[in-house]
Image (tube, rainbow, N blue to C red):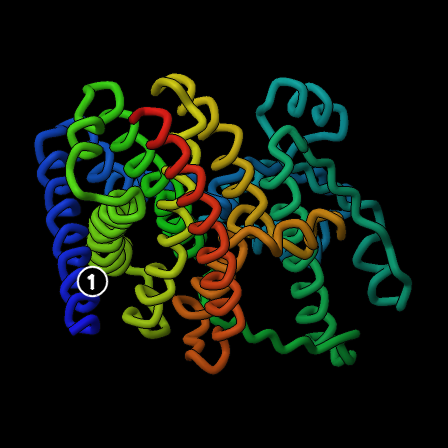
Amino acid sequence: MQGRRMQGRRMQGLHAIFHLGVKELRSLRRDPVMIGLIVWAFSLAIYTAANGVAHDLRNAAIAVVDHDRSQLSTRIRQALLGPQFKTPELIDFDEIDPGMDSGRYTFVLVFPPSFEADVLAGDRPSLLLDIDATASMQAGIGRAYVSQIAAREIAAYLQLEDAAPPVDPTVRIAFNPNLESAWFTSVMTLIQNVTMLSIVLTGAAFIREREHGTIEHLLVMPLTPMQIMLAKVWASALVILAAVAVSLWLVIEQLLGVRVAGSVPLFLAGTVLYLLFSTSLGIFLATLARSMPQFGLLFILVALPMNMLSGGNTPIESQPEALQTLMQAVPSTHFVAFAQAILYRGAGLDAVWPQFAATLGIAVLFFAVAAARFRRSIATLG
């Protein structure tokens, strides 16, 4: 008899959580601003980030000062082709500084006299490459391109002269054969927007109810704070998960042509684990804030560093060791790791289960902390 009563209470609790979640979805449906934000974040934001913020070298202005005027120097100059470079301009040495000061040239390659003769003699002549490093990423990529082109053309030229090339490199590029920055940018933007929108959605829902006084209506009902919080978590997570699935298929795969190598259901399963943390974080921040402006400030202090340091913008290995250790306690780091492994490299559960386990463990722990804070916040309202 007692077991039936406990089972009945459990079913009543699940029933209440379900209907409270449906209420959250209905409230979201009546909020056109939030719906517009979700649609924009998982469509236009990803598309424009992939196509508008390119990390590749495109149409860089380059000039050449050729003191050698040899077959080899001409060959290297003609190998500086688009779409990476504009057609190289032949200029004099005294035109370098005015051209770079005015921003006319980003790169200037200088061939010394007797360059071809020194190469054929087995010497190691130097090439001077002046770079405008105002845009540091473009400067670094361009330097590598020019160096590779010069080395390749010298090796090919020496083969034409029946001399053995200094090296014969064989390069195989995995996971992104054409080095398209849109492949990386689009998926990382999707992951970052999952963090931001899940935090905003749950936090704004709680603050909106508190400001409108509807949270007091829930307190007079036979509901526990845990049931209220679970309803908000599952409703917000469902909306974000549906947006991720549609965005991944429609925007990333169809519009941008990104090839997803791994299992999409496996990635969505990992996203569910991460959403348990991010939605709990949204509620936790909402309990600390007294208004939406305060919540926005807390969001900036928490969400932006998470996105910047989780490995989506720069490799986690390039950070200081102390910061790397600290970020292992943040689920966004593991989310980025298993998302890249699944979507880019086709990894299966056997490869990403440590990140799944870490994400789930930290999410459950933080959910308990957020629930305790939420219970205290609800008690003060009552």
Rendered location of residue 88, percent (x, y): 57, 41
299 relative position to 158: left or right: left
**Above or below for 157 versus 299:** below
- Hey, what amino acid is under mark 1? Arg
Quarter of the N terminus within the rendering: bottom left
274 relative position to 301: left or right: left
Write the residue at 24% across / 33% down.
37
**Residue annotated with mark 1:** 10
**Above or below for 10 versus 93:** below
Does residue 259 appear anywhere in the picture? no
Write the residue at 43% across / 33% down.
285
The image quadrant that residue 164 belongs to is bottom right
Write the residue at 79% across / 43% down.
128
**Above or below for 67 versus 208:** below
Front residue of 378 and 8: 8
Element type where label 1 sits in the image: helix
Rendered location of residue 74, percent (x, y): 65, 52
Does residue 83 appear anywhere in the picture? yes
Quarter of the C terminus within the rendering: top left
The image quadrant that residue 220 belongs to is top left
Rendered location of residue 167, percent (x, y): 75, 75
Rendered location of residue 134, percent (x, y): 64, 28
41 relative position to 134: left or right: left
Hey, which residue is sitting farthest front in the picture? Answer: 1
Write the residue at 66% across / 25% down.
100
Q: How many marks?
A: 1
Front residue of 307 and 138: 307
219 relative position to 92: left or right: left
Neighbour tally class for label 1: few under 14, some 14-19, many 20 plus, Cα within 10 Å: few
